[in-house]
Image: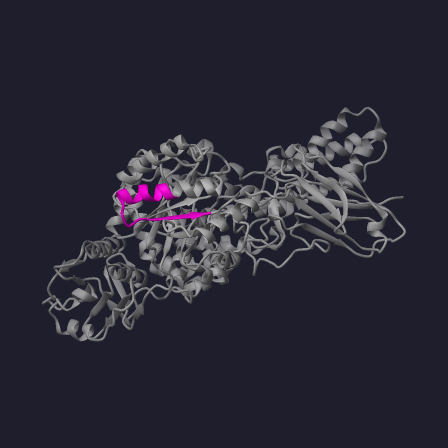
Amino acid sequence: MYRCLLPFVVTVAFTVTNLHDAQASDLNLTDAVIIASSRQEAAEQQAVRLLTDEVEARTSVRWRTSHKWPADGKPAIVVSSAELLREIESPQVKQFAAKIDPDKSEGFHIHTDAETSTVFIVGNDSRGVLYGVGRLLRELRMSRASASIPSDFKVTSSPAVSLRGHQLGYRPKTNSYDGWDVAQWEQYIRDLVVFGANAVELIPPRSDDDDDSPHFPLPPMEMMIEMSRLLDQYDVDVWIWYPAMDEDYGDPKTVEFALKEWGEVFEKLPRVDAVFVPGGDPGHTHPRHLMDLLEKQAANLKKHHPDAEMWMSPQSFTPEWMDVFYGIIDNEQPKWLDGIVYGPQLRVTLPEFRSRIPEQYPIRRYPDITHNRQSQYPVPNWDLAFAATEGRESINPRPRGQAHIFSLLDEYSDGFITYSEGCKDDVNKVIWSGLGWDPETPVIDILRQYSRYFIGAEYTDDFAQALLALEANWDGPLLANDRVCTTLEQVQDLERRASPELLKNWRFQMVLYRAYYDAYVRSRLLYETNLEERALDVLRIATDGNALAAVNAAEYLLNLALTDPPSQQWRTRVVELADDLFESIKMQLSVQRHQAIYVGRGASLDTLDMPLNNRMWITSRFAEIRKLENESARLKAINMIVNWKNPGPGGFYDDLGSLGPQPRLIKGTGWESDPAFFETTLIGYSTRAWLDYKQHPITWWRNAETLHDRPLQMQYDDLDPAATYRLRVSYASDMPFVKIRLVADEDIEIHPEMEKGDPVTLLEFDIPRQATADGELTLSWYREQGLGGNGRGAQVAEVWLMKNP
């Protein structure tokens, strides 16, 4: 009932889309010779090494490098900067050199001349050579003992965005990076460069993380030095994300300690181009003290790296602190400050932020591409089944979503370095890099280049489509999303075609893991939802004298989720792939099996079997029912379970965290124009309820929420003007100690600011008659005012508006 069927048309679709491997119209470069000037700079030499190494890794053919034109008629690949191009003696080179205009930094020209069997890669500068090589690698059709390129391939290109980078943190919480050695880091830096990245942000040894990891091949400071060295070899800008985490920077001794600690790090690193200090998350320093500290740290930095820049962000600031920050920027306009970062936990939109910051300060985006929920850009319309199992940090290709976020706000910034917590967001990094280079590039083109380069030419379109399908898996109610099964069928087809070598490719393994995981979760959801409905049907017909028999029968049905679970072959494959990913890239998908730092940091294997219905809550209620000696009391308790959502005659019930219709919830502007949910109601997740799910119905596992000071609102129409009403509400949330206030019709306080409670209990309040006398009612919940931080707090799970008898 719950297995995927494999229709013949799927196989046909894959067969006809992968014909372009090495076509007759391609220029065969298998025996090519690389032609380069003898005076190449170090970065250009590195570009040549990158080209030869990566072609050899995919073809087992190593291209020879020469300073002279091949006399044996072999194809030639000219790799040069425009400045050195004319030093290569060849009529073809001189003819091509006269045509190019090296006017834009980091730009390049690639020209394929089939008549002379020549490919030119000419950079406007040394970085342009590197990015030209990267583009050629993305276009080559490579397989064992074969390399070719379409004979008409030509491109002249330069980046639209000057800063295109990603954070690479060697620390335990990144789920895989902490297990990487120097060679793996160099490979990943190369991969990012091939797709156009020109900056990487490192993290110092002391941050908001554990000091050590069982997976570290080197101590953090030694690895940071190695990474700085590698980045310098590829002429990639080295940024440092440096949180100011000490308690009191108003204390001169604390400042003295920080200057010494940071200075020692700066001194040891071969290259530093910029330091970014977040105002919070972590850290909580008043802007006056923070800016004073950073002025000193800027001077400290320049002792060791004279051209390095100092940047900061007002993340997590309260409204009061934002005013202080704006005052400093407006009135003092500090010269030591080179730019400002817009990142998570800022309480204003990027357009508003840009309007408040003097134009002399560039703004760098710090977009969160790694977290699925409780984050800057959460997955919209994400089903609870995925949120509870795959979690906040999981393998998350979101190509179209990330492209939308990039494009919507690109005009308000001067570049980006993404916020990343490991390689699980690898596709998202490439999307940002690709669009940073050319914002007009179609997403599918970037994904096809990704697939061709990392997976293989024969998978160019098929793997790209699989990435899009994984994103679609997460869109909307999972019960109705039968695309999840189709995605697995398509990915299984790729799996059957894959060579043993490809099956060891970590990017291929991640797609397999997600496809099997998604399908297994949906299979369980279908099964467990059906079991719960059958159990409730049994309880609904319980009568005097058979209450305990009904409880026993219902419990048997619910426990079939444990005794006869579905799709165990998919579950077995998920576990196998988790072990494969640990073997290939030290991805820690389990605390016990792989020594992940903890479950919430990407250990999705440990939540694979998270209950997806109310089994645990209902069976815990059964235990209480069995203790009751009175049959009437037992039937009353059963009735409470089966009528949980019943608001009574003339009443209204709303499960606000559901993806279903929400006729009374005021939703705001919508994700399309507001992906950070500043003016849009979003689904939040009551992760504290998950920790004790025996005590909570599944409706308390998620909620509706608004951010910062925007109220969460509901609108009731067609009420009985002659009636009075009573409100029952559940404030299940992940922020139980952030206070909440409820107001009716803008000025009638239903309750003042109060903690939501931990553990959660149902609360009831009378609604004054004057609030409903006109047949309408607006309810507005407000988070505790004046807070900074993540903005969460106005969170409501369930609401019953009950008509009094």
Q: Is residue 689 magenta?
A: no
Q: Does the rendering let one see residue 495?
A: no
Residue 293 left/right relative to 189: right
Looking at the picture, does residue 483 appear above or below residue 528?
below
Residue closer to the observer: 453 or 189: 189
Q: Position of residue 560 (x, y in %)?
A: 64, 37
Q: Is residue 618 left or right of residue 639?
A: left
List x then y, in percent, for residue 683.
Answer: 62, 49
Q: In this view of the protein, which residue sits in the foreground, 89 or 306?
A: 306
User: Which quadrant does the C terminus fall into?
Assistant: top right
Check the image and tell me how it is coloured. Answer: one colour
Residue 231 in view in this figure: yes
Which quadrant of the view contains residue 184?
Answer: top left
- Magenta stretch in the rendered image: 295-313
The residue shown at (36%, 55%) is 455
Depicted 455 relative to depicted 557: above or below: below
Question: Residue 598: x percent and y percent?
Answer: 48, 34
